[in-house]
Image (cartoon, grey):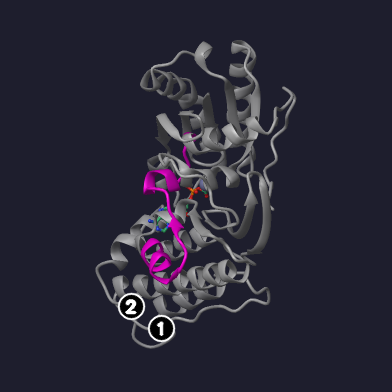
Amino acid sequence: MLILGIETSCDETAIGVVEDGRSIRSNVIASQVDLHAAYGGVVPELASRQHVEAIVPVLEEALIRAGVTLGQLDAVAVTYGPGLAGALLVGLNFAKAVAYAAGLPLVPVNHLEGHIYAAWLGRDDEPDFPALVLIVSGGHSDIVLMEGHGRYRRLGQTVDDAAGEAFDKVARLLGLGFPGGPAIDRLAATARPSARLPRARPDGEYDFSFSGLKTRVQRIVRGEEGETPDVAELAAAFQESVVDSLVTKAVRAAEDHDANQIVLSGGVAANTALRAVLRERSRIPVLVPEPVLCTDNGAMIAACGYHRYAAGDIAPLDLDIDPSLKIG
Ligand code: KG4
Ligand code: ZN
């Protein structure tokens, strides 16, 4: 079974071809990072326009690398939410056109569910349910119990900033540019934390909060808490606090719900410290996709689309985007 996966929810125009939900035949990603870096963040209208420019060549490249024609595909899977409305519209309408022209079923994919299925790309073991999933991206920080394919129960979420958003905002405060996550990751690896920054304790047992931490870093940078430490040491202290909060809650939720494995996914799952600390503290197996599969890509949408299609989830051609779609 060959599924085409189309992803345009934010600033990557990404299309992949995946066989049987596992094996990547191609995974082409046209990143817009350089375009948005000048503005210090993703500019939605620019993202949409860039998707329009890139999407045809990205599809052509994905088919060539996979060595397939449209006629050999079984279905077209596409992200219909959550994400930026204009960006989602480009991918969804393009997917509809491809599906219609090639006579293929259109399979709707929740972007967050796509991130989860990245965990089994390139592996041959089956998911061991229930799995505890930590989805940490630029827009989301969710703790979800995955009880089966397509069966999710959200246990916790951020009450303010998403983890990736916190990385991006703090990187900006530290003058590290955009996107902030990779920059902080690299810099933090070179230093010891300047001090122990607080871990927020929101009311929900498995909820997160990162905006207080961001404000604290801002105060430190402005010299409102005494001498300003070295940027690398401050980046390390910030990262340590975020990683500790994420890992502590994920491990606790997994234990409380008798999970058999932990899945770490979303762009922030590319973070070196987060990957290491979670593996260190978890007593059950931890699945983490390789970094390029943690950030937005088309292969994860195709992988998820395989399971959605198997469950009979086929969308009509008037399917609309859902920018604030949730999971669980
Ligand atoms: O999943 P993703 O590619 O897009 C969304 O769905 O949001 O995640 C992007 C986020 C950005 O906030 C970026 O700074 C963060 O993931 N990120 C990282 C790392 N690589 C990407 N955060 C921390 N460490 C990283 N190595
Ligand atoms: Zn994402």
Residue 193 - label: 2
The answer to which image quadrant residue 96 occupies is top right
The answer to whether residue 180 is left or right of residue 45 is: left
Evaluate whether residue 327 shows in this view.
Answer: no
Classify mark 1: helix, strand or loop. Answer: loop
Residue 201 image point, x, y percent: 60, 79
Classify mark 2: helix, strand or loop. Answer: loop
Residue 281 image point, x, y percent: 42, 71
Range of the magenta residues?
A: 274-298
* 10 Å crowding of disc 2: few (<14), some (14-19), many (20+): many
Q: How many marks?
A: 2
The stretch drawn in magenta includes residue 149: no
Residue 196 - label: 1
Residue 27 image point, x, y percent: 41, 32
The image shows residue 199, relative to residue 271, as above or below, that is below
Of residues 167 and 169, which is closer to you in this image? 167
User: What amino acid is at disc 1?
Assistant: Arg
Specify the farthest residue to the bottom: 226
User: What amino acid is at disc 2?
Assistant: Pro
Of residues 33 and 30, which is closer to you in this image? 30
Residue 51 image point, x, y percent: 51, 30
Instruction: Measure the alpha-carbon separation of dots 2 and 1.
Output: 7 Å
Kindly check if marks 2 and 1 are in contact, taking CB atoms under 8 A apart as contact. Answer: yes
Residue 273 - label: none
The image shows residue 101, relative to residue 52, as above or below, that is above
The image shows residue 57, relative to residue 12, as above or below, that is above
Evaluate whether residue 216 shows in this view.
Answer: yes
* 10 Å crowding of disc 1: few (<14), some (14-19), many (20+): few
